[in-house]
Image: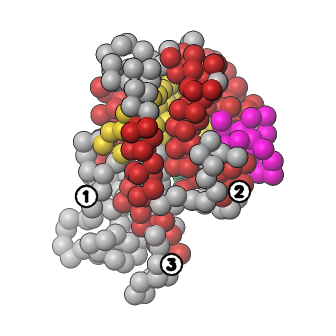
Amino acid sequence: ALPSGRTSYRHLYEYEYELKELARRNSKLVKAFTLSNPTVEGRDVVGVEIATDVDNIADGKPVNVTMGVHHAREWPASEHAIEWAYELVNGYQKDPAIKSLVGRTRNIVVPIVNADGFSISREAEPKGDFSRFDYEMKRKNCRADDSPPNLRSGVCKANPGGRDRGTDPNRNYAGFWGGAGAGVTWSSETFRGSAPFSEPETRNIREIVSKRQVTNLITLHTYGNLVLRPPGVADVRAPLEEPVVKALGDKMASRNGYDSIPSWGLYDTTGTTEDWSYWATGGFGFTFEINTAGFHPAYENAVVAEYTGVAPAAGAGKGGNRAAFLDMLSNAADP
Ligand code: 0X9
Ligand code: ZN
C-alpha cells in the first residue's frame, strides 16, 4: 500500500488540502507554503518543506527537492511526489533510518507545478466542439497568445477551445533556452514561451532553487520507465561530474527497474528543469519518466506498484520509486 493509503488519482483541491493538513498535524516537522507566482488563471502553487525544526531554514542543511506535473496530463507524477511527502513524515515517526536522513537534510515537495493545466486535465468534460479527451490530454500551461484575436485559445478557463494554448513549462527554463527540441510557435506542444522564465511555473521553481541550497532535485513525468540525467541536448558538454551523476542515476534505476540514460538519448530538449538547475547551481537533477502504459493509466500499476515496487507494474521491483527517492535523499545527506 501507499504511505497515505490512497487508491485513486487525487483532484487539485485534495493536494492542497492534504499538504496543509500534513503541516497542521506535524507543525515542527512540516511547513506548507504557497509559491509567490500564482498561475496565469490565478491558482496557487503549493508545496511542503519537511525537516527537523522546519522553521529554522537557515540551518545550512542540503535541500532535496521533489516535484511533479510540469505537464498537465501526467497525473502519476504528482501522486508519487505527494506519497514521498507522506513517506518522510510517516518514516520520521517510525523508521530510524528515515528519521536520520531527514534529520540531516531539508526536503521540499511540490506535487503540482502546473496547477492550471492539471485542473483542466483532471476535471475534463466535453465542451462545445471538444471532447473530454481533448481536455484530459492537455500538456502545457494556460498562457494565452496576447495578440488579438486569440486564435490559440486552448482548453483554459478564459478561452475554451483546442488544447494548443499555453507554454510548455519544461521548455521555459533558462538552460539552453530556445535551442533544439523546443517549439517556437503557440501551437507547438513544446512551445518554449516568449522568454526564459516567462511563466509562473518556472519562476516558482527558480525561486526555490535560487533562494535555497538545492543539492538534489527530481522532476517527475510520465512515461517511459526512464531515469534521465543532464544534458537534454546532444551538442553540449556533459556535466564535469558525469561519472558521479551517472552512478547515482544507475543506482536509482536499479531500484525502480527503469533505464538510466542521458536525457538527450531520448530526444533533444532545451529549457528543461535540470538542464537549468545543474548549470546554475551544480546541484544534481534527474527526470523520472514513470511507467510504460501511458500518461495516466490505471492507478494500481502506475502509482501503487511503481511507487512501492510491488508487482504487477512493468517497471516495479527492487523497491520501486520509494527506494529510488531514498537513494537521492541518501546522496543529499551523505554525498
Ligand atoms: O519532453 C519532455 O519534456 C519529457 N518527456 S514528457 O513525455 N514527460 O514530456 C522529457 C524531458 C527529458 N529531457 C530530454 N528528453 N532531453
Ligand atoms: Zn512530462
Q: Residue at x 63, y 19 (%)?
A: 96
Magenta segment: 306-322
Q: Position of residue 74 (x, y in %)?
A: 54, 56
Q: Residue at x 53, y 32 (%)?
A: 89
Residue at numbered disc 1: 42
State the scheme by which the image is colored.
secondary structure
Residue at numbered disc 3: 132
Amino acid of disc 1? Gly
First in residue order: circle 2 vs circle 1: 1
Magenta stretch: dominant secondary structure:
loop
Q: Is mark 1 within 8 Å of ligand 2?
A: no
Amino acid of disc 2? Glu
Q: Mark 3 or mark 2, which is nearer to you?
A: 2
Q: Residue at x 34, y 32 (%)?
A: 208
- The vertical placement of 269 against 14, above or below, is above
First in residue order: circle 3 vs circle 2: 3
- Label 3: element kind: helix
Q: Position of residue 118 (x, y in %)?
A: 44, 60
Residue 55 visible in the snapshot: yes
- Image quadrant where residue 84 sits: top right
- Label 2: element kind: helix
Mark 2 closeness class: few <14, some 14–19, many ≥20 residues within 10 Å: some
Residue at numbered disc 2: 300
Mark 1 closeness class: few <14, some 14–19, many ≥20 residues within 10 Å: few
Residue 271: within the magenta?
no
- Label 1: element kind: loop
Q: Do tag 3 and tag 1 residues touch (Cβ < 8 Å)?
A: no
Marks 3 and 2, how far apart at CA: 23 Å
